[in-house]
Every structure is written in structure tokens, then in C-alpha cells.
Amino acid sequence: MATTTLTPTLATAETPKLVKPAPTSDAKTPVTPTQTTFGCQHIKGLLTAARQQATDGYTRLIQSLRKEEGMSDRTHTSSGGAKTITSTTYLCLQCPTVSSTRDRHRKDHVFAVESDNGFIYCHDCRDFVYDPTFEALRTSTTSSKKRKLSALATSTEDRKFVRNNTSTTPCAATGLRGIYNMGQTCFMSVVLQCLIHNPLVRSWYLSEGHKSSDCEREACTACALDDIFTDFYGSEKHEGYGAVHMLQGCWKGGGNLAGYSQQDAHEYLGFILNSLHTAITEDSEENGSSKRRHTKDCPCPIHQTFSGQLRSTVTCTKCRNVTTAYDPFMDLSLDIRSTTVSVKKKKLTMINGTTTVKEVLPMDLKECLDRFTSAETLSSDSYHCRKCESNQDARKKLSLSRLPPILPIHLKRFSHSKVSAQSSKVETRIRLPLTLDLGPYLTVGPGQRSKADKAGELTNGHKPDDDLVLENPDEENTSSSSSIAPAEPVYELSSVIVRKGKIDNGHYISYNRQGLDGWFRFDDSMVVQVEEREVLGAEAYMVVYVAKGF
């Protein structure tokens, strides 16, 4: 038997290892290259989990699309039954469904194949995606040339233009990130989450409405919010975000909001909207714009988004003279009634007896609006009639003269007793409608003035004398100043802010709707998807409604 003797050399102290050469048959086995580039993260997940099934299914679809006599790819199912069309259809990659639109027919079916060219559409990315694996299959069954990314620009100037004016948006960068609590800063986090998921504010910032790189203001809240949008929608990060620059701006310009003590989310909303308005209008002035900063006709995106108008009418009960005033608002603060308990008797069948059950009665949001817009009586101590030239009793009524695209509503959950000189929290639960119709609370239709206002007539049918008083006359014609006024007074629930705990201590969380993905609960740095019933059952402190169409 042959032996092999290995003798260490002087150049190394290690004992040489005898490596057995690979068999010839192994060397001839082809090695499948590892795919490193994918069209998107969703295709990566599909090919990782079921590559063979996905490629086989796509190959069959491509082959069926190339059959000139076949019409299966043009036949889709609608409410009227099966229909054959000549326009582009979308074939589900995971089932035999054929659709005439790009709308997803099932939540777990992510990909569709476009019938004209066989391109893959990703529902999660909401765009066509270019994947090397599927592209190779598509071009191998056709005579068309393989698409190359470099072919998008034919000249050097074109490629330079595309490079300077485009950016890659990761699929996971959808804004679903929490914000770290930096010492009782949950009041700030919940309001920021509402702004981050606000469609108008988001669109303005993502279109580079305010560039922090070009701003020289110190502790600028507009720059801090721009950094947040850049980080939330520009990178695939899932950990919490430290809003340090926003907190610095809050401490510098927020007055009572500075420090680590507990603060009110509604007060912070007023501060941040005013601070953003100031920063944005200062930018316009520095750029040579002569736009006015007055709230009644301010063109800044903050007022165009949140600013509405109230109409107040005070009618003297003696001479019927009416005083009309118009006041702008950025949110509505609504009273809620104290907790009402209903006592009911419940039968106990097991022992043939009864027991007393106490049930806390909820309150509808529409009831809060009814109370807000209902007429109230003013005593003669608080109203002086200019026509009677004396103090008189009067009736005061509020109505919505102009609606904003985004309507924040604050529910007054804290009451103060003059007798006991103590404050308490109102625990009444508010039933929130997913769709809110504000038509019954309007002075007239949105974006219009009534003929009665234009003619100087009263809405109750009485014609005033020449002594009719119009307070704030410069503001009575602002009902159509918003260039993006809602087309109809119908709103959809977008955000809910909840304050847990009692009046002296508590914690804020928020619920925000994220497109077609549903509702998410934001609790500091933790983000969890929740059911709709949890949102509607929450003890709301602030709610945000978005007009339909935005």
C-alpha cells in the first residue's frame, strides 16, 4: 500500500493539510448563479420563497399572451358578467384572475402581468418593476429586444438630466415609523404623526416646498419637519426617529412648551401650525414675493390646508337687528357633556332575580357639532344693541362659512368647577363616524356666499335697516379665498389622538390611516397595525378629518 509522508518546511510552523481533489463528475455540475439584483423587495420575497412556481407561472402567461387567436387575456369579470375588451388588461401572477384595471383584487396577490408587453406590475410598489429573472423569461419567448436601463436616455445630456432629477424611492419607505419619547414628548409625537400622514402637507414637503439646506433660520420647525419627511419617506428604516431638531424649535419658540413637563397636544398643534406659517412666509418674503401673511388670504400651504371660517350672527330679541362677524379658525374646539350613567335592571335567570347595571352613555360627534352650532341666549349684561342704544337680550348662532380641506377637531375633555375650584377629566366616549357630512352646519354651500349676504338681507327673512352692523367687514368676503376648497362638505376620518390617564398625568397615542393598508397605532417609537373597531372605540381627544378628494 502506498503511503504519503508530509514533512514540514522551515518557512511555516503549520502542518500542511492534504486536500482531496474534487471528482471529475462534480466539476462538470453546473452552478446556478445567485441573483443579487431584484426588481423590488416584494419580487425578492417571491423568488426566495417560490422561485420555480413563480417563473413557471410567468412563462405560461407570456406564452398565452403570444397566441394571436387567444382571447383569454382580454376577458375579465365585472358586475355584468364576463366581458371581452380590446384595451390593456392585467393578469394576476398568482391566480387566473384577469382585470381591466390595476386595482388589486386580493390583498395577498401582489403581482399582475400587463397584457400588451408582459411587463410586471407590483401592487405594493404601485408601479411597474424591472427584474432580471422575469425580463429574461419575457424576452426569451419574444422577438423583442431586452430592455436596458441605460436605454432610457439616448444621449449624454438626457442621462445627465435623468440623473439630476430622479431618485430611487425604496418600497418600504412609506412613513410608518415611530418617534422616540425624549422625556414626556408624546404630546409632540402624536401631532407630528398626524402631519406626516396628512396628504396635503406630505405632498408639499415631498415636492421640496421647503428645503432645509437652503434655510438659514435657527431652530427652524419647517426645516425640522422637512428632515422628518426626508428620513421617513426616503430611507428604509424601521427603528424610531429622534425629533431632536423639532424639540429644539419647540423649546425656542413655544414659550410654555419648553421643558420636560407634561404639555397639551392641542396647544402644540396651534404652535406648530403658526410656526410653520411664519417660517414659510418668511421664505417667500426673502425670495422677493409680495404675498400677504394675513390669515384671511395667506397663500401658504398651512393656511390653504387648515384655515376655515366661522360666521357668527347675534340677533337682538327686541328690534331684530343682526350683527354679523366672520372669524378664521385652524381647528374647532367642541364641548362634550359630562359623563351620563344609565341604570338598568338585568334579569338573572339562574337565580330568578334581578341586578342593577350601570352603563355609561356615549355621545355622537354630530351631537357635539349640533351643540356648537345651536343658538344660545345672551343676557342683557353681555350684549349692547347699537340700534336700541341699550343693553338687550340676544340670540347668538355660529355656522361654518368656509370649510378647509383638512379639519382638526378638539374635544374639550377637561372641565373646571368654580364651586370646588378643581379641574377634572370628562370620560364620555365619543362615537366617531368614518364619514362626516358637514352640510347641515354650513352657512351656505362651500366656497360660495348666499344671495342674502350679498343683498344685505337676513337669513331669517327680515330685511335690516341701514343700521345693520357688520363686524370685521374686511373678512366677510373671504369665503372663497381658498384655492383648494373642498368640492363637497363630506369628510373622511384620517387621524385620532388619544390622551390616556387622568388630568394630572397621562400619555398620548395616535391612530393614523395609511392609504389602503388600513389603520396603525403610533405609541412613541412603536407602530402596530390595528383593526378599525379599535380606532372607533378609542377615547378621542383630537380627531382629524380630510375632505373627500384629497
Image (cartoon, helix red, strand yellow):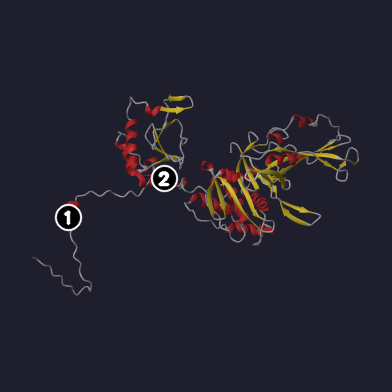
Question: Outermost residue, left direction?
Answer: 1
Residue 306, numbered circle: none
- Which of the pair 107/219 is nearer the observer? 107
Q: Is residue 54 above or below residue 258?
A: above
x, y (%) of residue 530? 54, 47
Q: Secondary structure at mark 2?
A: helix
x, y (%) of residue 478? 71, 38
Left or right: 138 as drawn, with respect to 231: left
Residue 42, numbered circle: 2
Three-letter code, disc 2: His
x, y (%) of residue 533? 58, 43
Left or right: 339 as drawn, with respect to 50: right
Residue 243 falls in image quadrant = bottom right
Three-letter code, disc 1: Pro
- Which of the pair 341/196 is nearer the observer? 341
Residue in the image at 61% along x and 39% along y? 434
Q: CA distance from mark 2 to mark 1?
A: 39 Å
Q: Dot 1, crowdedness within 10 Å: few (<14), some or many (≥20)?
A: few
- Which of the pair 90/217 is nearer the observer? 90
Q: Secondary structure at mark 1?
A: loop
For the C terminus, the image quarter is top right
Q: Dot 2, crowdedness within 10 Å: few (<14), some or many (≥20)?
A: some
Residue in the image at 52% along x and 56% along y? 240
User: Mark 1 — residue?
Assistant: 23
Task: Return the disc, 2 or 1, that comes first in the chain's sequence.
Answer: 1
Residue in the image at 44% along x and 44% along y? 162
x, y (%) of residue 185? 61, 58
